[in-house]
């Protein structure tokens, strides 16, 4: 079986985990680019890989090289598991050191509350305002810590549980599922949006977030929606450069930490694979996770908006 066929086998296996379309595209791109830089694409020896990665790294940022290295490491791990190759040669290929990303929450003590309050009311300057949807998107970031891809993957049935024990079921990074507790304020925002959605577009798709035509929101549309919310609230200068929607998630995590949540609770709630901390891993119960969410003061800002 040739290298190109092995790549397809790997991508097919990864697709079963239900990663985002963008993740699969990134895998394919990293694998194809390195293969294209090899003198012989069928030669997957350490020497061949080192030469290809050296060419790849010449005009790319360390983070891009590190991501490609990780993709190839996963690729070879798959091949070893399937018994196609005897060992993983990536340990013989150097990878760059990438500085840890520092959190980029919204700046300003009351910025989240100001943002939610401004977006909760219809802005008549908009052609077709939909405050219920805009408020839900912000609340999912600020009060549940969801990533952009996780929001796009939500369904109308993703919110489950009895009153007082409500939670949102999320397909996280790498296809890892997680359950995030939601407080009554966020639950009310969800219900208000679903009511408005039925009036506007009927039932149609079960994708939670839709545009004004009832079509599922796409990545660019969701990013534009969040940017427009910042502008309408007059807080654009408080958004860290390059963060946009992710600033909402970072604000959620930062406030959890400030309000007393520990590293394990934050790890579980945000769906991180790990947290580099000095403390030992602590098993967190669902009651502890809910208490951590309840302590997040942004939730209290929602209670008076619906």
Image: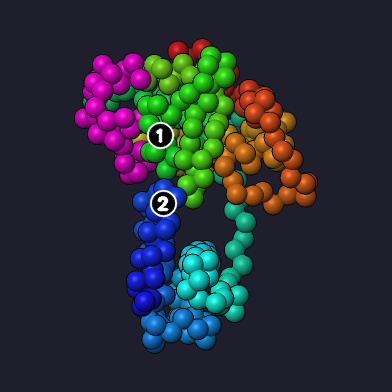
- Which mark, residue 16? 2
Q: Residue shown at 41%/48% (left/top)?
A: 18
User: Pointer 1 and pointer 2: residues touching (CB < 8 Å)?
Assistant: no
Front in this rendered view, residue 263 or 60: 263
Which residues are drawn in magenta? 194-223
Front in this rendered view, residue 298 or 275: 275
Q: Which residue lies under the disc numbered 1?
A: 154
Front in this rendered view, residue 128 or 55: 55
Asked if residue 212 is among those painted magenta in the image, a careful observer would answer: yes
Which image quadrant for residue 263? top right
Residue 117, position as x, y percentages in the image = 47, 20
Indicate left or right for 235 with 183 as reference: left
Which image quadrant for residue 37? bottom left
Classed neighbour count for the residue bearing mark 1: other residues with Cα under 10 Å, few (<14), some (14–19), many (≥20): some
Query: Which of the two discs, 1 and 2, sits closer to the camera?
Result: 2
Residue 42, position as x, y percentages in the image = 39, 82
Q: Residue shown at 31%/41% (left/top)?
A: 218
Count of picture labels: 2
């Amino acid at each position: 079986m040739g290298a190109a066929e092995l790549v397809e086998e790997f991508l097919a296996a990864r697709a079963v985990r239900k990663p985002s379309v963008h993740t699969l595209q990134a895998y394919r791109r990293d694998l194809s680019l390195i293969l294209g830089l090899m003198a012989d694409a069928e030669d997957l020896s350490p020497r061949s890989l080192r030469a290809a990665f050296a060419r790849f790294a010449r005009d790319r940022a360390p983070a891009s090289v590190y991501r490609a290295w990780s993709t190839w490491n996963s690729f070879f791990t798959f091949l070893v598991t399937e018994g196609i190759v005897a060992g993983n040669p990536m340990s013989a290929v150097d990878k760059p050191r990438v500085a840890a990303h520092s959190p980029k929450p919204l700046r300003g003590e009351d910025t989240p509350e100001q943002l939610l309050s401004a977006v909760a009311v219809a802005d008549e300057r908009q052609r077709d305002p939909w405050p219920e949807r805009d408020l839900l998107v912000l609340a999912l970031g600020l009060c549940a810590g969801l990533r952009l891809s996780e929001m796009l993957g939500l369904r109308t049935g993703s919110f489950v549980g009895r009153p007082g024990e409500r939670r949102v079921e999320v397909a996280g990074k790498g296809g890892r599922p997680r359950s995030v507790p939601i407080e009554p304020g966020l639950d009310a925002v969800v219900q208000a949006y679903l009511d408005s959605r039925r009036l506007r577009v009927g039932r149609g798709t079960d994708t939670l977030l839709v545009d004004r035509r009832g079509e599922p929101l796409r990545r660019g549309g969701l990013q534009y929606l969040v940017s427009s919310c910042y502008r309408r609230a007059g807080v654009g200068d408080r958004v860290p450069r390059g963060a946009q929607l992710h600033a909402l998630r970072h604000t959620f995590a930062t406030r959890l930490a400030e309000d007393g949540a520990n590293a394990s609770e934050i790890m579980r709630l945000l769906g991180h694979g790990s947290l580099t901390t000095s403390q030992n891993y602590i098993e967190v119960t669902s009651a502890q996770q809910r208490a951590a969410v309840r302590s997040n003061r942004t939730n209290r800002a929602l209670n008076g908006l619906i």
